[in-house]
Amino acid sequence: MTSTFSALRAGGRLLWSPFLFLAVSILLLSGCATNDVHPHPTSTSVAATATITPIPTPNQTPLGLHDAWGNVSIRSLPGTLAGNRQFILENAATPDGQWLVGVSQPADFVKNTTQPSYLILYGVTTGQVVTMRQLLHQQSQVIGVSADDRWVVWSEAADQPNFFDWTLFAYDRQTHVVRQIAQAVRSENGPVHGPVPYPVVDHGHVLWGQAIGEVGSDTLQNAVVMMEDLNTGEKTTLATKAGSPAIGWPWVAWDQQTTGSQGYVDLSNLVTGQHMTWSKQPATVAIAGTSIAYDDEYSIHIIDDFTHAPINAQLITGATNGDYAEFTSLNDRLIAWISTSSSLVYDRVEHRLVELPPSSGVTPGVIRWVMGRLLVWLDVSTLYVIDTRTLPTAPPS
C-alpha cells in the first residue's frame, strides 16, 4: 500500500515568452513501481472484486490534427497586448471555455521596476481583457491559478527564485470582489521554507498545499493540505504531512507521507466520504470524473476508472531522445502534457495520439494544456485554442 518517495522535483512556471522563463518551485513527488488503488476499510469502500472494461490499446502512430479531427475550429489569440504588454497564460480557463486566465505584464518584465502586472481574463472569442487585480509588487509572479464557474483562485509571490513569501487570493466573478485566503507562515527569519501553493478549485471549494514549518528537500513532515469553502469561508485541514492536491469534483487527491520516506496518494470523495489509497506515487496527477492521468516524468498513463479494482492503468506514450513527458492535464476527451521534442496529445475517444501543428513550421508547441473544455497550445507568441466538445468521434474518411 505504500511507496518510496524519491527526491522532490523542482519545476517551473511555463511561460510563452521566447526570452523569459522564470522558474518557481513546485512540490511534485516521483514514483515507485506499483499502481494499485486500495479501498480504505470503511462502509463506503469499493469492493475488491469489482472489474472494469480494459482500456483499448492506444495507437502509437500519431495522426496530424486535420487527419484526426478534420476542419475543426481553431481560434488564435496573440500573446501581445496593447500598451507594450504581453499575456502569460497561467494554465487555467473558465469551465464554459469563454475565458483564459493569465497575467498581463510589461514586455520588459525582467528589467521593469515601475509598471505593475495584472491578473486578467482573456476572452477566447472576443479578445476582451478583464482585469481582476493588480499583483502586489512590480516583480510579483503568479505561482498557480485555477478557476471554476464562479471563482478564480491564485497564489503569487515576488521573492525569487523560491517564492516562499506567497499570498493566496480568490476572485468572485459574480461580485468582482477579491479577498485574501491565506499567506505564508512566518518565523523569526521570515516566511518558512517549503512547498508553495498551487491552488485548485471546483464547486466553490479551493484546495492548496503549504508549509507550516521548515520543510526539508525530501519530506512533507511540516506540510499540510488545506481546503476552504469559498461560499462560507470555512477552512479545513484535510491532511497533515501531505501536499500536491488535485481536484475533479467530488474527488480530491493528495500526496500523503507516512513514516520516513514512505507514503501514498490519498483519494477522497468530498460528497460521499468514500476514501481510497493508491500506492503508485506519480510525479503529477490530473483528475476528470473518475479518471486519472499521471506521469512519472518520462511517460504518460491513464486510469479510466480508479473507483474499481483491479485497476487497469494504460501506458499512453513515453518520452524519446532524453526528453521529459510531464505536467499532465486531463479532461473527458484529451490528455495533454509538456515536452520539448514533440507536440502530441492523446485522444481518449479515438484512442490515438494526435500531433498539433506548429503554425510557424519551425518548432513544436512546447506548452500544451487541457483546461476544462479547452485545449490550448503555444506556437512562438500565438495561443491556439480548440473547444474539445467540437471534436469528432472518429477521424474523417
Image (spheres, rainbow, N blue to C red):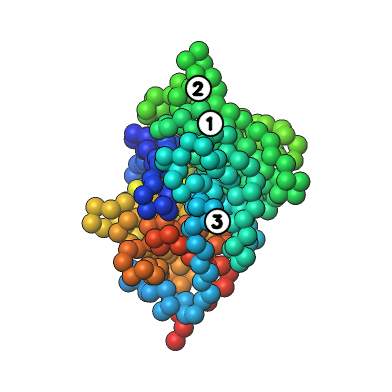
Residue beneath disc 1:
166
Q: Is residue 45 left or right of residue 23?
A: right
Mark 1: few, some, or many residues within 10 Å (few <14, many ≥20)? many
Amino acid under disc 3: Ala
Residue at the image position 54 percent from the left and 34 percent from the top: 137
Closer to the camera in the image, 103 or 323: 103
Determine contact: label 1, label 2, CB under 8 Å.
yes
User: Is 329 above or below relative to 62?
Assistant: above
Nearest the eye: 275 or 174 = 174
Direction left: furthest residue: 321
Mark drawn on residue 191: 2
| Circle 3 residue | 82
The numbered disc on residue 27 is none
> For the C terminus, which image quadrant?
bottom left
Q: Quadrant of the N terminus?
A: top left
- Viewer can see residue 267: no
Residue flagged by tag 2: what amino acid is it? Pro
Q: Which of these two is toward me, 116 or 224?
A: 116
Q: Sequence order check: which comes first, mark 3 or mark 1?
A: 3
